[in-house]
Image: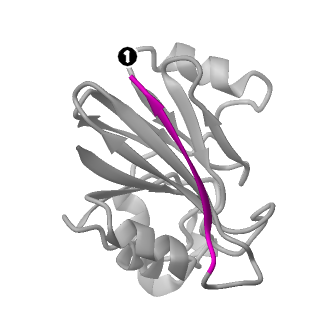
Amino acid sequence: MLRVAIVADTHGQLDARVAELVAASDLAVHGGDIGNAGVLAALQPRSGRVLAVLGNNDVADKWPAADRYLLGRLPLETTEDLPGGRLVVVHGHHTPAKDRHERLRRRFPDARAIVYGHSHRLVADDLAEPWVLNPGAAGRQRTYGGPSCMVLDAGPDRWALAVHRFPRASPCAGASRRRARA
């Protein structure tokens, strides 16, 4: 099994509880609207590998001057072959909100899962393939109930998804739910 931490929409701040889940993972994925280089540096999975895409707010005038060199290195979309299937990562701002999941499924039919951000809304649409996953906001802006993320355990025969939402008021508490699909 490969453990993948999935985050998005940090806008310059990564919740420490989310960072702890990333540290216990093999790979970190950021679905855009990163905010600065410090967020990417704070994503420290066991392997040190971080995949990230640009969001609509990842532009020079919204990033610190010293970090802007990274903007030219980040793609608009990326893919990663995981045990059991392909993971696609986009920010989602180029896909209209109406029927977004169906549009993403049509655009990436060979994926096992598609990660997107942009809406800041935590969504695990895993009843059809490819799965369409939005980890919500892992920072402080528009978290809609608290910072959130996902952890995907990817194996050759089975993928399991854990969804985590942390209360805004309590930095020590967390809530999660687990789903598994063969």
| Residue labelled with disc 1 | 110
Vertical arrangement, residue 34 with respect to residue 125, above or below: below
Vertical arrangement, residue 121 with respect to residue 109, above or below: below
Category of crowding for the residue at label 1, using alpha-carbon neighbours closer than 10 angstroms: few (below 14), some (14–19), many (at least 20): some
For the image shown, how many numbered marks are present on the structure? Answer: 1
The quadrant of the picture occupied by the C terminus is: top left
Percent coordinates x, y for residue 2 in the rendering: 25, 47
Percent coordinates x, y for residue 154 in the rendering: 31, 39
Residue at the (43%, 75%) spot, across then down? 20
Residue at the (50%, 84%) spot, across then down? 65
Specify whether residue 145 is in view: yes
Specify whether residue 68 is in view: no
Horizontally, residue 91 falls left or right of residue 151, namely: right
Residue at the (77%, 32%) spot, across then down? 97
Quadrant housing residue 35: bottom right
Task: Please tell me whether residue 178 belongs to the stretch shown in magenta.
Answer: yes
Vertical arrangement, residue 59 with respect to residue 89, above or below: below
Element marked by disc 1:
loop
Task: Please tell me whether residue 123 belongs to the stretch shown in magenta.
Answer: no
Percent coordinates x, y for residue 111 in the rendering: 39, 23
What amino acid type should be assigned to the residue bearing mark 1?
A: Asp
**Most prominent secondary structure in the magenta stretch?**
strand
Residue at the (56%, 31%) spot, across then down? 132
Q: How is the image coloured?
A: one colour
Horizontally, residue 98 falls left or right of residue 62, namely: right
The quadrant of the picture occupied by the N terminus is: top left
Please state which of residues 174 and 104 is positioned toward the viewer in this rendering. Answer: 174
Please state which of residues 167 and 129 is positioned toward the viewer in this rendering. Answer: 167
Percent coordinates x, y for residue 61 in the rendering: 62, 73
Please state which of residues 56 and 28 is positioned toward the viewer in this rendering. Answer: 28
Q: Which residues are magenta?
A: 173-182
